[in-house]
Amino acid sequence: MQNGKLLWVDDEIDLLRAHIIFLNNKGYSVDTATNGTDALEMCRETPYDLIMLDENMPGLSGLEVLMQIKEFLPATPVVMVTKSEEENIMDQAVGQKIADYLIKPVNPNQILLALKKNIHKNEIVEEITQSGYRQQFNRISMQISDSMSADDWKDVYKRLVFWELELQDTGGAMDEMLRMQKEEANNAFAKFVRRNYIGWIANPDKRPLMSHDLFKKRIFPLLDAGEKVFLLVFDNFRYDQWRTLSKDLAAQFVIDEDLYFSILPTVTQYARNAIFSGLMPLQIENMFPDLWVNEDEEEGKNLKERELIETQLRRYRRKDKFSYNKANDSVATDKIATQIDQLSNNDLNVLVVNFIDILSHARTEQKAVRELAADEAAYRSITLSWFRHSAMNELFKKLAEQDFTIIITTDHGSIRVSQPTKVIGDKNVNTNLRYKLGKNLKYNTKEVFDVKRPADAQLPSPNLSTTYIFATGNRFFAYPNDFNYYARYYSNTFQHGGISMEEMIVPLITLRGKKH
């Protein structure tokens, strides 16, 4: 069995024959060199899986050889072996991106561990991860069946996202197994929402935290405690995307992670207006008709967010000094970053960030973006790349230096849809693929959650006979006359508005800078 081809560079290589025989017996092919010049020539002629490099050699030193190797073999792992424990040598080696660092005299097991970490890591991780999920599969299935409360479903969703992120780089049969389990979970979650949603709206004391509760229950208590709050609302931001970004923020912030439930429909017009107003959509329409825009009106649906925040502050007789800003691109974000010192004088700063939502819609409409974000993992990867390389990263660095309590949240998430379901309505029916409202809608009642009395869900009713229907699972609505077109064009796109864990159970994150 061939486990890998190694080059061991050491001017005292004869003293290491026992180690080389040990590696040979473990299935490794080992070439040797006694100096840096020969080693560099051999590296140019032969592809090696890993290089063991002595730090202290006559002629070219180990560090000098390392520097040259990294110029033409940047991906080949190099393990530095040395007698020296001087910190500056270690720093230089680490700075040159060595794969590992061993102190002489080395024992065979140390060497074997270094090889496993750097040659076989992916295979080992893949095997262990897939085995771990296989063992957890039945337990998660039981948890799905037994989930009776909102907290239960938050736990289920967290666990599924954990395994989705663990498995995303492994490939193999477990991916399909997880996909099927998520589908099972979403079908059960839809039944849970059907049973409970109207009751949640009617009984504030018995519901989970929802969009219109956010300010009252999470933001105002922080302000009352004398904390300055910076609220970042990332439009269309899912929990798995947050988990992907969170590692980049862990060094700067202490992170407190939670989830809450978006209201229906899970779209910006309804959910974000509910956040900022502290009211359900029907209440906004009744109390502030000039701040609510119906679906059939051409005016923008989220142009009054500052005013909605003001109404909520007035309603609770609050005098908090606040700012509101919206960032559609890096230029706007960068502008906010330059104003941090000025914004620190406010009690509350609200920033709406639209990039992720723009990305989601661009993926639907543009073939190139759809190719770049071909699946869930790629979608997360693009989100992470944007965060790292945009002005948003710089903004967080500046926020970390200020005495802010930072809240990261969203209005709703999205789900990758794949099952078209037929709906019939008149020309005035809205265009969203995950929810519809109108009169005389025809649909399969088993595939939707329908609200025939919108007032029960605190939703506006443009007509006396208006019905709302919400797609469940990974379904999306398509019209019979264009069914094949819709099915083909919108399949595997990210949509929102309906009922799924991804759309409704969304991140609510509290960050505090470690310097404070």
Image: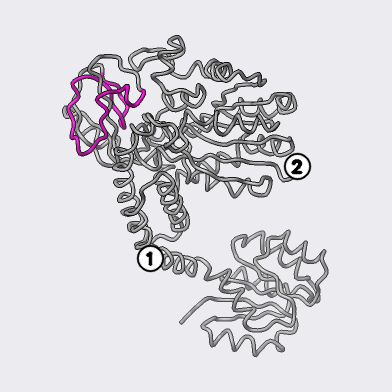
Seen from the viewer's position, the closer of residues 162 and 106 is 162
Mark 2 lies on a secondary structure that is loop
List x then y, in percent, for residue 278. Answer: 50, 24
Q: Is residue 116 left or right of residue 64?
A: left
Image position, residue 147 (x, y; %): 36, 51
Please provide percent x and percent y for residue 50: 60, 71
Which is more toward the observer, 403 or 199? 199
Which of the two marks, 2 or 1, is nearer to us in this view? 2
For the point 81% across and 76% down, the residue is 58
CA separation in Å, label 2 and label 1: 43 Å
Q: Quadrant of residue 127?
A: bottom left
Q: Earlier in the sequence, mark 2 or mark 1?
A: 1
The magenta span reads 429-458
- SS under mark 1: helix
What residue is at 50 percent from the left and 77 percent from the top?
3
Q: Which is nearer the eye, 203 or 506?
A: 203
Residue indicated by mark 2: 516
